[in-house]
Amino acid sequence: MRVPFRLAPFGQVVVFSLFAVLAAGCAMDDPGNRFAGMSYEHLPDINLDVGDIQVEQAYKATTEAPNVGHRFPVPPKDAAVRWGQDRLVAKGDRLTFRYIVRQASAIETELPKSQGVTGLLTTDQSERYEVNIVIDMQILDGRQVQGTASAEARRSVTVPEDITLNEREKVWYKLTEDTMNDLNDQLEETIKTAFFPYIVL
């Protein structure tokens, strides 16, 4: 359907090691650690009167703090690219539609914690995660730009200081999913209004 896009005595050590291996195996087998890839093929095609769809990853992701998108089960940049690949379909014989992932960041911000006795009795929100995705779109006739538009979605969430890694990954996954749902609405509306002459009904 898609157009292709471009440690102790020895005996104890053995016992402890065996328990460690078993525990690691259980952690790897935890179904909660498995996340489905995000797909948008279940949504209607957006048919465009162009001969070529170009989906481009222009966002230069970094693994340096405070960036954490590379740790997400589905990085926002990958979800944003997948949307363009899944939903945009060329139905013409000329012109080019460019879908450019300009921004797809996920930022971690440490939050202040309660001090003293209050801190001992309180479970604070320890980090805030914010995902921001920006998509630029163009219609090109050769090298001449015929039309441009952008769509953006931004969401954030905080997590408590006692959250587990598995729970944190679930929060990251849902944050990406919710941001992409917002972006989906923005993209549909933007394409419908900004590129209406190029939509094939």
Image (cartoon, rainbow, N blue to C red):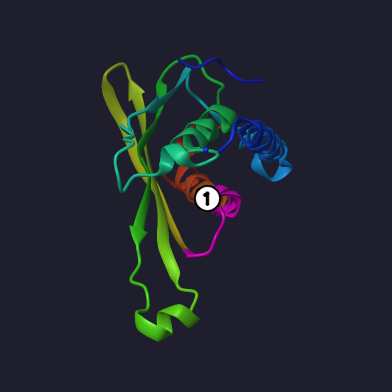
Residue bounds of the magenta highlight: 159-176
**Does residue 44 appear in this view?**
no
Q: Under tag 1, what secondary structure?
A: helix
Q: Is residue 171 above or below residue 61?
A: below
- Our reading of the magenta stretch's main secondary structure is helix
Q: Is residue 148 above or below residue 165?
A: above
Residue lying furthest bottom: 117
Return the x and y of residue 8 as percentages of the image width and height.
55, 38
The quadrant holding residue 129 is bottom left
* Quadrant (top left/top right/bottom left/bottom right) for the N terminus: top right
Neighbour class for label 1 at 10 Å: few (<14), some, many (≥20)? many
Q: Is residue 20 shown to the viewer in this render? A: yes
| Residue 25 left/right relative to 192 | right
**Left/right of residue 86 with respect to residue 113 in the rendered view:** right
Find residue 24 and report its horizontal and vertical position in percent.
65, 36
For residue 147, which quarter of the picture? top left
Is 75 part of what is drawn in magenta?
Answer: no
Instruction: Say which residue appears at 53% left-offset and 64% top-offset.
Output: 162
Residue 125 placed where, x, y %?
45, 69
Q: Quadrant of the C terminus?
A: top right
The residue to which callout 1 is attached is 172
- Would residue 79 appear left or right of 109 to someone viewing this image? right
* Whole-percent x, y for residue 153 in the image: 43, 52
Q: Residue at x 49, y 14 (%)?
A: 93
Q: Is residue 162 magenta?
A: yes
Q: What residue occupies the far left of the structure in this picture?
A: 144
Q: Image height check: is 86 above or below 149?
A: above
Residue beneath the point at 29% across and 39% down: 64
